[in-house]
Amino acid sequence: MGFLKTLAKRFVALVNADVRYEDESNQFCIMLRVCQIMLIVYMLLFELLTFLFWKGGNPYLVLPWIAIIIGGFWTTYQFRTRVVFHLFSCLTIVWIWLFVHYFGWDVGAQHFLFPLLVVSFFATYDNIRGKTIYTLVLLAFRLYLFLYVSEKPAMYPLEHGTQSAFQILNMVALFSIMFYVCWTFSNTNQEAQKKLAYYNKRLKHEARTDALTGLWNRRSMLESLEKRVSGESQEFLSVAIGDIDFFKRVNDTRGHNCGDEVLRRLGALFAEFMQDKGLVCRWGGEEFFLAFSTNGDIARAHIDDLRERIQGMEITDPSTGEIFHITMTFGVEEYDFSSTVTELIRRADDKLYAGKDSGRNCTVY
């Protein structure tokens, strides 16, 4: 049992082995290898049917083709994707012609042109002209086969029971290969779509948030405020701009890593504090902007509460392990239902600078 498991693992590793050329994906060659394995199984079952049903026929008719398919399997490790695909196409077309020539149209070998058509659209991704030509070639070959068998009878006419057995085998093989090819590339497409959706979502998130704190950025806040004041809402709106006191001193004396840690800790505190009160963003540098759905008096009370929490927050210097504290100054302004967003922000900013001029660590409303 252990030997069989080891053998199976080695076989899977062989099928999934990478291609020779670094600039090509191995996915197509893996798919082609699996298809060739399925064709070998098909040929062996065909061989079995010749022993069971085809009296007087050549019992070793497909053995050379098994050897040829094994050779085609080997080419997937040696040549480029285009070469491998064209070799596979030529061998399949020759096999289809011989099958129809020997056994006639009704056995259904000509239907194996359809997997070739499907595979051709994934063998190359940038050559629509080549795909169009290849499709026309397959169509012309199928028309030729149809006209050929209408003029010439099969070399080995089969009895009804034998013909049905071969036809069933062909249908099962055809649907199995088509299922595998479509499943492989639909999975690839779905995975690509998922990745694209994920990256789009991430890019959208990154475009709207500040990378350091995880809060909204200035652009997101401005968009939200513009929507708010351009609507007909009669709800209160108050804004506050806060600036970290002596933040340059933190960067100069403790280093920018410590300054970043201060901003991260404040970002987490603001996000938690504003969860049920309104919106918050990193306005730029050491400034933060908050928007409350309340009047100015309540907004000021919230800001005073927030200032106390900031002042009591213990921050650890990543370099020295020393614990220190910071303070912030805020300017608060209530929306008057007539000003523009720019005017509202300017008035809040003026009050912030009035607070900084009057000694910092205060709220000006």
Image (cartoon, rainbow, N blue to C red):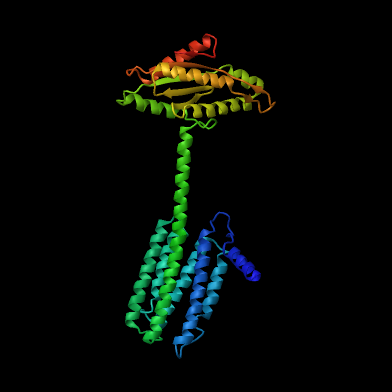
142 and 201: which is toward the camera: 201
Q: Which residue is most to the top?
A: 358
Residue at the bottom extreme of this rendering: 56
Please indicate, yes or no, whether residue 323 appears anywhere in the rendered image.
yes
Where in the figure is residue 79, as x and y percent of width and height?
56, 63
* Residue 328 percent location from the top left of the image: 54, 18
For the N terminus, the image quarter is: bottom right
Determine which quarter of the picture holds residue 240. top left
Q: Residue at x 62, y 66 (%)?
A: 10
- Across and down, in percent, residue 342 comes to 39, 19
In the figure, residue 346 lies in which quadrant? top left
The quadrant of the image that shows the C terminus is: top left
Outermost residue, left direction? 232
Q: Position of residue 78 (x, y in %)?
A: 58, 64
Q: Nearer the viewer, residue 186 or 138?
A: 186
Marker count (numbered):
0
Q: Residue at x 48, y 19 (%)?
A: 303
Q: Residue at x 39, y 21 (%)?
A: 294
In front here: 5 or 33? 5
Q: Is residue 87 visible?
A: no
- 44 is higher (above) or lower (below) than 192: below
249 vs 362, left or right, is: right
